[in-house]
Amino acid sequence: MTGAGPGPTDAEWAAAVEAVRGLPADARVLLICHVNPDGDALGSMLGFGLGLRRLGVRRLQATFPGPPDVPEPFRWLPGVELLVAQDDAYPDPDLVICFDAAGDSRLGDLVDRLGRAGTSLVLDHHASNTGFGRINLVDPHAAATSVVALGLLDRLGVPLDAEMATGLYVALTTDTGSFRFEATTPAVHEMAARLLATGIRPGDISRRIFDTRPFGAVRLFGEVLGRATLEPAAAAGHGLVWTYATHDDLARHDQPAYVLEALIDSVRCTAEADVSCVVKQSGDAEWAVSLRSKGAVDVSRVAVALGGGGHRFAAGFTGRGPLDEVVGNIRAALGAEVLTPHS
Ligand code: 5GP
Ligand code: MN
């Protein structure tokens, strides 16, 4: 499941280039990404979209599943003007391009566009990608989907500019944890150097994306972190730390749900636990679960076992039922994962 494959073949790159280059002048192109879009999903999609604009694609839309609200930290991104609400997105585009989604279950109501589009192109870097596009550019060794997106822009001959680079840089810094994670290879720094050479300002970008939150969110984090639970015996002794946040918590501090995306970073620094987890209420009895590992446990396998996906060190799934049950299932899956030899 997580045995990383070799990445796109020459034939797959060529097919993707042809899918874009062969478009008639009036073709409608729809860009989509996964639900609750993060910096990689939005940054790759908008950076690539601006590249398509430079190529002369005029009828171009970008969207994501669910309510059309763009999380505040991303509202300034070049290319946000391409975004439309999912209901306003071309119902039957000539080409649909999907960013950073491991499977079509991550596309919500937009999944119908895959079937109705003339053709579909998937750009992703999840080892668990199901290959749901007509053409799939999936590179499990890529640190972010934006690595694949820039690979395709290069092959299309689009010259990089600062606006495109901004989204691609946001994507790269998001998925490498600002160049701290294992995925931070020499190639990642070489790509970052190319992006920075366009003149974008990394300090401004990082502050806006990672280091800014409303005071209400600071207070909310204090409360939610205050009830974090450490279970040293979990994951066969590797340890689990977890906490949760409900709609009530958000309402009490008058905060939108996206502020909780950064919470996992404050939880996962716990020294006594290999695995960290934040359970975020997303419906009446529905929870968006984020899992992180320091390496002893492959959390993508845990997430896949619970109906989700992700990477070895960062994964997630949607849990259903009461909170206790969801956390119980995580505990059980962690125990089973640690005791199962990797294939
Ligand atoms: P996050 O915890 O930041 O939401 O997600 C971490 C990683 O897990 C990302 O690579 C994300 O794509 C993946 N992931 C999160 N939730 C889900 C889910 O419900 N299903 C799948 N397939 N992947 C998920
Ligand atoms: Mn990603």
Image (cartoon, rainbow, N blue to C red):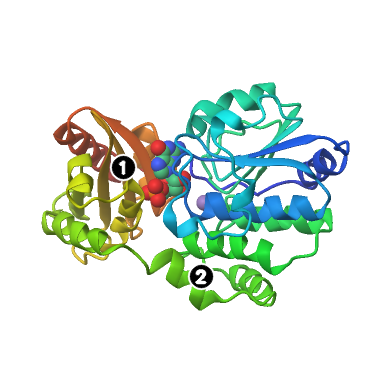
Specify whether tag 2 is near ligand 2 (CB below 8 Å): no
Q: Residue 139: horizontal and vertical position, in percent?
A: 62, 50
Q: Is 163 left, or right, of 180 in this rendering? A: right
Report the residue at 56% width, 56% height from top. 144
Specify whether tag 1 is near ligand 1 (CB below 8 Å): yes
Residue 12 can be seen in this image: yes
Q: Amino acid at mark 1?
A: Val
The numbered dot on residue 289 is: 1
Q: Is 30 left, or right, of 43 in this rendering? A: right
Q: Are marks 2 and 1 in contact (CB under 8 Å)?
A: no
The numbered dot on residue 205 is: 2
Near-viewer residue (316 or 97)? 97
Q: Is residue 122 above or below residue 230?
A: above
Q: Residue 164: horizontal and vertical position, in percent?
A: 68, 61
Q: Residue 195: horizontal and vertical position, in percent?
A: 66, 70
Q: Amino acid at mark 2?
A: Ile
How many residues crowd mark 1 within 10 Å: few (<14), some (14–19), many (20+)?
Answer: many
Residue 309 can be seen in this image: no
Q: Is 104 left, or right, of 236 in this rendering? A: right
Exactly how many numbered labels are in the figure? 2
Q: Is residue 194 above or below residue 56?
A: below
Near-viewer residue (277 or 205)? 205
Report the residue at 36% width, 38% height from top. 317
Instruction: State the SS at label 1.
Output: strand
Report the residue at 78% width, 59% height from top. 154
Near-viewer residue (154 or 81)? 81
